[in-house]
């Protein structure tokens, strides 16, 4: 940043991999929208090892470009963007044209009250049916984990305070499941979140997401974040299933087959108690970890 340039209020991060066909249009749209606001802004394109002219097109369109040495993943690009952003508020959206830049002000309006605002795709969005079905499953699991209604877990269109985003950079995976991680991290850590309905568009160009591969990763991330912030959400159900399976299996042996209660039943019930105790200890460790991180944040 030149000495004469004012520090931006807003940093717009665009992770991009071979998006030369769409990124100029997206950048121009963002510039048009933000030129009508009172915010000083910067547009930061993270070129994730593109083999086309993404970096050149972005720079010519007026964006600040940071190039990754090779394709490290969408989440890795977001992490690079967060670390290099200069604004107090970070806006993230995809470079493929599916997120409407005209909705950026609607997200920014919420940042005076909330720590993060997420653009939640409505039924009117131009999205694939199988992805809509998968997103409903993810949203349901995330709602259970977080205890808050999740409208769109996987949306990459969001605004977040930089002070909050920096806390969770180390947790974000390098691939496409970073929205899942940062959403659950923010909620479980007690930060405020609001959803803003948007109408998503069909992306320009070919998608880099693989439904089965990345869908499995989303599920793993949900479990990972759950064990970090709310271990009992996993350990208690597993423990109960094992305990009652052993208990009723033992009863069936006694009253149905007229056999002894059995070692299998006793083993399942014993393991269930152990699983519950491990979950209890994990819950205490998670709380201590959270309290410690809050302490260091206050010291800073």
Image (cartoon, rainbow, N blue to C red):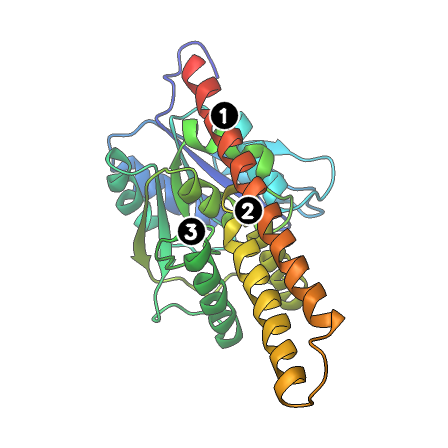
Give 59 or 243, whichever is nearer the viewer: 243
The residue sitting at 44% across, 24% down in the picture is 294
The residue sitting at 45% across, 68% down in the picture is 136
The residue sitting at 48% across, 62% down in the picture is 141
Q: Quadrant of residue 256?
A: bottom right
- Residue 146 is tagged as 3
| SS under mark 2 | helix
Q: Earlier in the sequence, mark 2 or mark 1?
A: 2
Q: Earlier in the sequence, mark 2 or mark 3?
A: 3
Q: Position of residue 101 (x, y in %)?
A: 37, 49
Q: Quadrant of residue 243?
A: bottom right
Residue 63 visible in the snapshot: no
Q: Which residue matches tag 1?
A: 293
Label 3: how many Cα within 10 Å (few below 14, some 14–19, many 20+): many
Give 260 or 113, whichever is nearer the viewer: 260
Q: Disc 2 and disc 1: Cα gap in Å?
A: 16 Å
Q: Is residue 248 left or right of residue 188?
A: right
Q: Which residue matches tag 2?
A: 225
Give 38 or 117, whichever is nearer the viewer: 117
Q: Is residue 272 left or right of residue 119?
A: right
Label 1: how many Cα within 10 Å (few below 14, some 14–19, many 20+): few
Q: Disc 1 and disc 3: Cα gap in Å?
A: 19 Å
Residue 22 versus residue 203 in the image, above or below: above
Residue 138 visible in the snapshot: yes
Cβ atoms under marks 2 and 3 closer than 8 Å: no
Q: Earlier in the sequence, mark 1 or mark 3?
A: 3
Cβ atoms under marks 2 and 1 closer than 8 Å: no
Q: Disc 2 and disc 3: Cα gap in Å?
A: 10 Å
| SS under mark 3 | helix
The residue sitting at 41% across, 58% down in the picture is 143
């Amino acid at each position: 940043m030149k000495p004469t340039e004012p520090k931006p209020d807003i940093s717009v991060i665009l992770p991009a991999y071979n998006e030369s066909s769409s990124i100029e249009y997206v950048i121009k749209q963002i510039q048009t929208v933000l030129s009508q606001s009172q915010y000083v802004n910067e547009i930061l394109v993270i070129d994730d090892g593109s083999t086309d002219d993404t970096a050149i097109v972005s720079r010519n369109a007026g964006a600040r470009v940071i190039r990754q040495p090779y394709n490290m993943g969408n989440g890795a690009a977001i992490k690079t963007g967060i670390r290099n952003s200069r604004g107090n508020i970070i806006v993230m959206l995809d470079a493929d044209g599916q997120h409407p830049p005209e909705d950026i002000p609607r997200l920014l309006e919420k940042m005076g009250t909330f720590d993060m605002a997420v653009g939640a795709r409505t039924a009117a969005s131009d999205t694939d049916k199988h992805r809509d079905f998968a997103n409903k499953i993810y949203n349901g699991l995330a709602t259970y984990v977080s205890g808050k209604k999740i409208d769109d877990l996987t949306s990459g269109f969001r605004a977040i305070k930089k002070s909050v985003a920096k806390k969770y950079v180390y947790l974000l995976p390098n691939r496409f499941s970073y929205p899942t991680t940062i959403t659950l991290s923010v909620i479980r850590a007690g930060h405020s979140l609001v959803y803003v309905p948007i109408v998503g568009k069909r992306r320009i160009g070919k998608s880099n997401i693989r439904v089965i591969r990345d869908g499995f990763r989303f599920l793993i991330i949900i479990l990972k974040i759950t064990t970090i912030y709310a271990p009992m959400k996993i350990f208690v159900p597993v423990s109960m299933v094992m305990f009652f399976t052993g208990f009723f299996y033992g009863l069936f042996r006694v009253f149905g087959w007229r056999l002894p209660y059995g070692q299998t039943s006793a083993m399942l019930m014993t393991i269930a108690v152990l699983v519950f105790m491990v979950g209890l200890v994990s819950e205490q460790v998670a709380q201590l970890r959270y309290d410690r991180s809050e302490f260091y944040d206050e010291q800073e």
